[in-house]
Image (tube, rainbow, N blue to C red):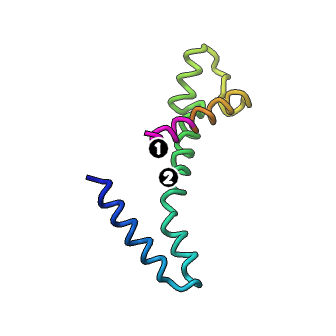
C-alpha cells in the first residue's frame, strides 16, 4: 500500500525538480532530501539520551555489570561498540 504511492509521488517530484530553474533547483532538492537527513539525526539524538547513565540502556548496563560508574559515553571502546551497533541496526531494514 505504501510503495506505489511513494514511487508515483517520487516520480512526480523528480519531474518537477527537472523543470525548475537552476537558481532554485538546489534549494528544492535540499528540501526534498531533508527528511532523509533529519530522521537519522533524531535517531542518533534519542540513542545519545538512551545510553546516558540515566537513560534506559545506560542504567541497565550499570545494573547488569553492578558498576554505577560505568558509562557508555566515557569509554571509547564502549562508544565505538555503540556506534557500530547503531549503524548496523539503523541500516539493516534497508537491506530487506
Residue 59 place in picture, x, y as percent: 55, 25
Contact check, label 2 and label 1, Cβ < 8 Å = no
> Which SS does the magenta portion mostly show?
helix
Q: Residues within 10 Å of mark 1 (few under 14, many from 20)?
A: few
Q: Is residue 61 magenta?
A: no
What number of labels is visible? 2
Residue 87 place in picture, x, y as percent: 58, 39
Q: Going by the image, does 37 lie left or right of 11?
A: right
Q: Secondary structure at mark 2?
A: helix
Q: Going by the image, does 7 lie left or right of 47?
A: left
**Residue 35 drawn above or below residue 57:** below
Residue, disc 1: 94
| Residue extent of the magenta highlight | 88-96
Tell me what residue is drawn at x 44 percent, y 71 percent.
14
| Mark closest to the chain's N terminus, 2 or 1 | 2
Tell me what residue is drawn at x 30 percent, y 54 percent.
2
Residue, disc 2: 39
Tell me what residue is drawn at x 63 percent, y 36 percent.
83
Q: Residue furthest left?
A: 1
Question: For residue 86, what is the image quadrant?
Answer: top right
In three-dimensional space, the C-alpha distance between marks 2 and 1, rounded to whole angstroms, equals 14 Å
Residue 91 place in picture, x, y as percent: 52, 41
Q: Nearer the viewer, residue 76 or 60?
A: 76
Q: Nearer the viewer, residue 51 or 40?
A: 40
Amino acid at each position: 500500500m505504501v510503495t506505489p504511492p511513494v514511487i508515483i509521488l517520487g516520480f512526480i517530484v523528480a519531474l518537477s525538480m527537472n523543470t525548475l530553474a537552476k537558481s532554485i533547483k538546489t534549494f528544492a532538492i535540499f528540501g526534498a532530501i531533508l527528511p532523509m537527513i533529519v530522521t537519522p539525526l533524531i535517531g542518533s539524538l534519542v540513542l545519545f539520551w538512551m545510553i546516558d547513565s540515566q537513560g534506559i540502556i545506560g542504567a541497565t548496563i550499570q545494573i547488569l555489570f553492578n558498576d554505577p560508574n560505568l558509562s557508555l559515553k566515557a569509554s571509547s571502546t564502549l562508544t565505538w561498540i555503540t556506534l557500530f551497533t547503531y549503524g548496523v541496526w539503523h541500516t539493516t531494514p534497508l537491506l530487506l
